[in-house]
Image (tube, coloured by chain):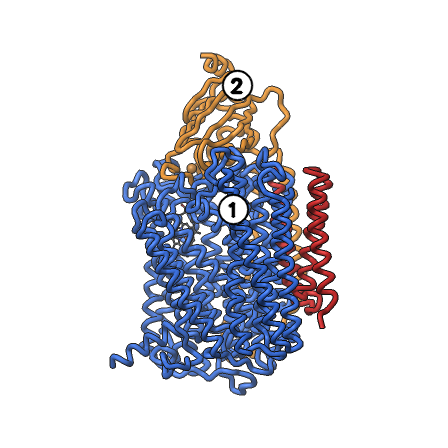
Chain colours: A blue, B orange, C red
Amino acid sequence: MMEQAINWLKGWLFTTNHKKVGILYIFTSCYFGFVGAVLALLMRTQLSVPDNNFLTGNFYNQAVTMHGVIMIFWFLSPLAIGFANYFVPLQIGAEDLAFPRLNALSYWLYLAGGIFEIISFFVPGGSANGGWTTYQPLGTSQFSPGAGPTLVFIGWILLTVSVTLGSVNFITTIFWMRAPGVTISRIPMFTWFMFFTIVAMLFSFPALIAALVLLVSDRVLGTVFFSLASIQPSILWDNLFWFFGHPEVYIVLLPAFGVIAEVLQVFSGRPLAAKNVILISTAIIVLPLSFGVWMHHMFVTGVPLALQNVFSISTIAISLPFDLITLAFIETLLHGNIRLNAPMLFALGGIVLFIIGGITGVFLSSPVLDRVFRGSYFVVGHFHYVMVGAAIFGLIAGIYYWLPRMTGRMYNEGLAKIHFIVSFIGFNVLYFPMNLLTDMPRRIFTYQSIGDWPLLNGVASIGAYIFALAQIALAYQVLNTWFRGPPSPPNPWGAATLEWPQVQTPVVGQEAPQGGWIGELNTENVGKEKLHDNLSSRPILLTAGIFVALLGVPYYSSSLGIATILIGLLILAYSVIGWAMDDLKERFVVQDSEAGERWPFHLVSKLKLGMWTFLSSEIIFFGTFIGAYLYIRAASPSWIAVGSVHSIPIGALNTILLVTSGLTMALALESIREGNQRNLLAFLGITFLLGSAFMGIKVSEWADLASKGFLISSQNQVISIAASSYYFLVGLHGAHVTAGLIVMIYLMKKTINGQYTKEEHRGIENFALYWAFVDVIWCFLFPLFYLM
Amino acid sequence: MFGLLSMVLAAQPQTAETFSQLFNLYLAFGTAAAVIVISLLVFFVIRYRARDGHDPSKYPVPGWKVALITAMITLSVLVTAEYQTIASESNITIPNDTNAIHIKVLGFQWGWSFTYPNGKTTLNNLTVPAGAVIILNITSRDVFHSFGIPMLAEKMDAIPGKVNTMWFQAPLQTGVYRDAIRCYELCGAGHALMIANLTVVSQQSWQRWISS
Amino acid sequence: MVKLSTLYVWAYIVAAVMAEVYISAYMRSSASGYTAISLLATSQATAVVLFYMQLKEEPNSIRLFAVIALMFLAALLAAMIATLG
Ligand code: HEM
Ligand SMILES: [Cu+2]
Ligand SMILES: [Cu+2]
């Protein structure tokens, strides 16, 4: 009994199975959705009547901030990722995701980040309160002191890291793991839209991580990127945040479109109309252009008029493909045989709400109209129509649609229909009044009784209760179906995609579910010498280490904080070494099927595809830092003179050392390509020495600079900002070099074991990529800091 | 919003007039589009409800043709809208008016201070002569704020370390427009209370007021 | 057998470092000096990416990743600097 329970628990905590991780994502995201909804109801209660005293201004601001952050980052996107975990591999006939342990790691990092968000409410001073956009300098410690905001931003960084790892995983999966027969043109719509989502994530999240890391560095290390208004205007943050922020709105929306596209086909009995138009316009217009519209959020920050016009036009342009998609969705219904089951109702409702939300968005693309709408409740109405109306309704359609597949049981259709009707009405009562509140500022915690504000706000609050209460029906449905629902036929909707058992099964790599996953276990080999393929304790342990270490960060000036950090690092080291030992002893082996559809990556190994995907996001990551540095320099009236602080000869010497280590690493790779293990070891050793020398010289340079008064804390603002950017960027690069050195120790050990051969040396190949990338970054940092 | 419209109707300074014309155009296009598309969806759902003996696979799958036509229609609507926006940008371009009155606006946690050409300063009350062209130089002492006068359809961020400009034509009707000025960017616990009045007086009394 | 191109690339990068230092000493803080240094840095980075990271030998589909990322990054940097007016 006891043992069974432990095995059950291990089966979830150590799982790397995509279905189970998917279920973890879905339930965790719903929990955070609940937290976000409670915060929303607190806000709507406060706003239901004028001059209300239910909440203080300070707590309201925390609620509005964390409601936005939690709903977007811990509820909406992760819910979609949960579905993607479960169904993308099934839809393309893959055994699992490309990197199962990485996938589990993504989940645990997401959860750890979420725990930070929650505990931030309970530390003295409370949580972050500058809005989900956290415009600077409001989020710096001068205006938001305390550990709470720091914890929020740290948790947020964990989430962004989780998303980046997930992006690499999914792109590799979708391109490299398709079963024979699942050619590009046979990829189902949900997988396509998840793919678009993931691509947008891959390139936009690095900018957010960079911005958040700069912010945390300001708060913890005392750098001054966002807090020196006299030197540089602070729209640096706006640029970085919205460069990420606009793609983010599509990241939130597109998975729901994927579900809607599946559901429409199944319940109308018609293939998707103009499918290629949808796919192509999303791929070549929506994705690229989503990175070129962000300044429509900055029309009133005083950017030049010409720039406003460029971004206004690009915003108008991006609405065109959405118009095509919506009309194609509607055209799909033509000549159909429409069944109005719950998934279909929510999909259709989502389309209707998207139409309204999309049209109000066109209003916001006009810089002239934005002079009224910006920062008003009109915006709140607009984005809830899109994010709750289109995205949440679409994902609820997904819940009903796939519930029978996940549980093997059928939900109660009558209750589901009531759920839809009440949700739809409640939604409009809640949000339509906001479209009319064009003069009411958003994020205000109270208002006086003027004009129609009391009426419209009162109506909206009533709608909020209706809408929120309706979701209880959803929670009941899911749990009730899961544990008690009547058995469902294997393919109740007659769907044609591969996640459902087909009459003739051409290519599926997966068995049909019998009774779902709850209670089903595969834990025989836990804890024994040879780990079961499915289980690994490393992801959760690794995350625990990171979590504990970061928990101490806001308190690093106390000994308790330091102790916490050290304990965390210890756990981290233990699990990293464990992970490496797993690889060394080949304990956790993922068997790749030999055959499969891999175009256009059929010539590339799986690991290499993953590595390049990761590197392309690193380009944005480092590029954002370098861009921030260039921006600060361009904005600041003066700068330290070339050669006056940094010694050019030492910098040049160090550059040559690092470049030479790049050469020796390339030679190491060439050696093992010819099967020469002895030379591999020698070149790895030289690379290690050169890299260590580089780091040694760096550290002595820093000591020297510090003794000369080149300090972040300098009273001279120019020196302070110059020192901030220098120590930060060069330090970040140094951290990458150091990480590389640590990995090299492992590579040398594995080389000595003779585990790299002419045929199998992917580890060396990928490390060579990484090391060369570190070189590339330095090629820019050296001239930027020493010569220019 | 109804409040906004009625205020605008009472006195129609230039910026508000331009705004409401543009807004009405967008509203007409937007409402028409929403009504047409949503009706089409509802019609299809009713017309093609599941029925016996109907075989949906008999009909060809729509390709790119309809998409192309709808794209053309939408494109023309969008281009018209965007063209009108650009034609209305006098609202967001500082006019070249030698008679304009320049006033400095400083946002702070939590209030607005106004400095007039002769150095006179007021708190949370902006007094201007009726019908005059006013140019504001807006900045902030601490964090982001956003200075907005919805009834005049104007708004501009107050950003530390940066001076932004904004203009409007003062209302023609004299009087105190209570709470006409608000902060539209979250700026801390007192954000909701960052309100100021707009006082419009006649040209002569303004001269008298400012030199007092 | 060591590929000669690997050594040539190294020699080029080291030479470019020298050239950068030289330029910065003799054309200090001039726009043309900055341009020259930036071009040299870009050429070094390109050489590393093409030869040490072997992008030269990868299929176009892999190159696309880097190209897309660089495009987005260019958009970010250009518009961000443009906001300074
Ligand atoms: C129970 C349903 C919901 C209610 C009653 C609700 C209500 C609200 C309210 C009152 C605000 C404050 C508006 C303001 O003062 O600016 C707000 C902001 C926001 N909501 Fe919701 N909301 C709900 C669901 C959602 C969902 C599901 C999402 C997202 C994915 C979401 C995303 C946001 C965002 C991003 C903000 C802006 C936060 C900020 O200003 O920093 N909301 N919501
Ligand atoms: Cu946007
Ligand atoms: Cu404010």
- Residue that label 1 marks: A702
Give the structural element (helix, strand or loop) at label 1.
helix
Q: The C terminus of chain A is located in which quarter?
A: top right
Residue in view at x 53 percent, y 60 percent: A201
Residue C63 pos. (x, y %) = 67, 64
In this rendering, position of residue A265 left or right of residue B179:
right
- Mark 1, Cα crowd under 10 Å, few <14 / some 14-19 / many 20+, is some
| Number of the front mark, 2 or 1 | 1
Residue in view at x 37 percent, y 34 percent: B193
Mark 2–mark 1 distance (CA, rounded to whole Å): 51 Å
In depth, the one of B154 and A530 nearer the eye is: A530
Residue type of the residue flagged with mark 1: Trp
Can you say whether A605 is above or below B162 in the image? below
- Residue that label 2 marks: B117
Q: The N terminus of chain A is located in which quarter?
A: bottom left
Residue A575 pos. (x, y %) = 41, 68
Q: Quadrant of residue A184?
A: bottom right
Is label 2 in contact with label 1 (beta carbons under 8 Å)?
A: no
Can you say whether B45 is above or below B25 in the image? below
